[in-house]
Image: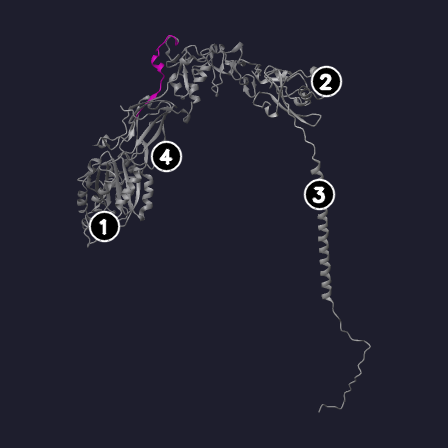
Amino acid sequence: LHSVVPLRIHTRPDVFHSRNISDMASAQSCGECIQAGEKCGWCIDKDFLKQGEQKSTRCDEIEALIKKGCSEASIENPRGTVSVNKNQSLTDRTKDGVKLKPDQITQIQPQKLTLNLRSGEAQTFNLIFKRAEDYPIDLYYLMDLSYSMKDDLENVKNLGTDLMAEMQKITSDFRIGFGSFVEKTVMPYISTTPAKLLNPCTSDQNCTSPFSYKNVLSLTSQGSQFNNLVSKQQISGNLDSPEGGFDAIMQVAVCPNQIGWRNVTRLLVFSTDAGFHFAGDGKLGGIVLPNDGKCHLQDNMYTMSHYYDYPSIAHLVQKLSENNIQTIFAVTEEFQPVYQELKNLIPKSAVGTLSSDSGNVIKLIIDAYNSLSSEIILENSRLPEGVSISYISHCKNGVSDKGENGRKCSNISIGDQVMFEVAIMAKGCPSNGKSETIKIKPQGFTEEVEIVLNFICECACHKEGIPNSPVCHFGNGTLECGACRCNEGRIGRVCECSKDEVRTDDLDANCRMDNGTDICNNNGDCVCGACECKKRDNPEERYSGKFCECDNFNCDRSNNKLCGGHGRCECRKCICEANYTGSACDCSLDTSTCLASNKQICNGRGTCECGTCKCTDLKFQGPTCEICPTCPGVCTEHKDCVQCQAFGTGEKKDTCKEQCNKFILVKKKKKEELPQPNDQPYINHCKERDANDCWFFFTYATKNDSTVEVHVAEELECPSGPDIIPIVAGVVAGIVLIGLALLLIWKLLMIIHDRREFAKFEKEKMNARWDAGENPIYKSAVTTVVNPKYEGK
């Protein structure tokens, strides 16, 4: 057993359901109690139950049981565990220069664990995966040999040696195989006329007879053998476009012996240029039996294609996963969308675009392999009912995720190590307490982790039970874990009654308080002449007493808290904690909240009642009677005494010794030497003015022994007298400058005025004109007379 990698094991109850309160309230045995929740415990102390309490009162949270008086040693609280049974170290492909066999390589650790699960309590462990270097690969090339793939077949004939050479760069242990498919050999998928059965192609083409699936070459390390056998293959034909590839994939997956699969990386390359038939399509050919998922190869030919329908996608997913086969769909661009959707349904599969003549098939395979191998996805087998599992991944570069993404890590290179945190939890007692085994493995890998699940359904004290114990009313039950587990037909705390005798008038009379009419004060049931008090929805609240007359939740409250949060409620009365009193435990006897800054209770001017100061001096107020709105400040109050003691001045200089002896005076040279706020507590810094308008500085502090200490700076800050010469010079200079400024302003205004007048003159000069008019009394001296006889000749 190796243990080179530390395995962190812990429980995570916080991420799962807490106790089921209703189950806890009805638990009649220790086993039922621990199944109610991970926080539940069972008190086995025989004297634990009080009068009127039911057996189920023994079941409660651990803290609640301790508060009720059950010692920790008397509490049954079994916990789950994780143990590692097989923990081989992670290995590399080579070791000490010796080539390892595939079954000697370990990529996941640990390999086997045993979990003891208690209901509601998760057990967590770490799985570590490291991708091994030079890991073996088996690749099976499954090709569509319908007529449309004729040109592709020519390129695939040399695939063996070429692909072998490329894969040698990835692994030194590589094997390759070849298979082909066409379609079911019934109508309407192929023509069943004799001539077409011999040659389904046109008369000028030489094609082989149609077939469903043929295993041409089992997995081999001889690339030349692949080339030789594939070169002998001939194209065939069919009638419809979708092909019968699903039949072929199923046989490749479920016939490991015939194909030659090893427990290594298994790759299936599916090459086609058409779609696919799936479950239900067989009805067209009269085939109705569902595919049975079994191997039907005889002489490397699938012989039941006419008998069984095509497999469904879900069926293929199951078989590919069971046999750890990773599928690469090499299809033409036309059918890319179809196979992309199919890829999303098949885990650990990839899709590559095949050129029209399959010329790029080697690059396609290499790229798809790198993509598939760089992603690690964990999957688990079917879980028993009531068991759940969750994953948290811790991948490269500190990337973590949870939920469905917690199952996988991407971009994993050779030699990279990743970790998965796995948590498994059971609810109740699955499988009736029988052990179950589940398995976890990385998809596409043959290695797996085996986990044995044991369920904790009973307490350890269950084995020590005493059947037919005299304690249980003359042997009517088993004394188990401090309580009686009654035989069939018996009830009561000690099985003292038969179910047929539970309610009688005589017994009910014993359950009435003071001959009243209410049975158990309506807070319980009368069982065998004794009250069994009812359970409350809140498990913290309970009834008690012979007649269920007491409870622990109907006491006085303060600040909306039961007993002020400082006591416990017993039979409707508060039992207060130390330093608290009052009906609701709301009166504190602690005086620390009443201490003033001078360490006096309420500043010596009040009394402390229930943790609050009641000020007796009406001038003072506040939480500690330190606030006095009408009182002068400390600085003003002591100004005169400080002045007379330090400087011999001030109003009290004559009566200084009599009136100013209440403090100790300490002189300092400068104000910078005075105590600072952090030097001592409760210090006041003061700045006051004397009769000469000088400032003096002092501090006033009350020490812990109630003495007052005053520190005063001898250096005063006095205002200096005015300098006359600069003032006079400034005034004269100001007057001169103001005069000059006024003269300049006057001169500027005059210039502006003159320019405006000149402009106005020029404008009027331009507008002057002489008018030429006629003299109204002037008459011309010339008179013109026209001869009326003149005709212009």
Q: Does residue 83 appear in the picture of this structure?
A: yes
Q: Kindly identify the amino acid type of the residue bearing the numbered disc 4.
A: Asn
Residue 397's label in the rendered image is 4
Marks 4 and 1: which is nearer the front? 4
Local packing at callout 1 (Cα closer than 10 Å; few below 14, some 14-19, many 20+) is some
Looking at the image, tell me whether mark 4 or mark 3 is earlier in sequence order. Answer: 4
Which residue is disc 3 drawn over?
Answer: 734
Give the crowd class for mark 2: few <14, some 14-19, many >=20 residues within 10 Å.
few
Q: Amino acid under label 1?
A: Lys
Q: Position of residue 14 (x, y in %)?
A: 42, 25
Q: Nearer the viewer, residue 747 or 35?
A: 747
Please give the residue where the numbered disc 1 appears in the rendered image. Answer: 150
| Residue occupied by mark 2 | 654
Distance of label 2 from label 1 (alpha carbons): 129 Å
In terms of depth relative to the viewer, which is nearer, 104 or 49? 104
Secondary element at image label 1: helix
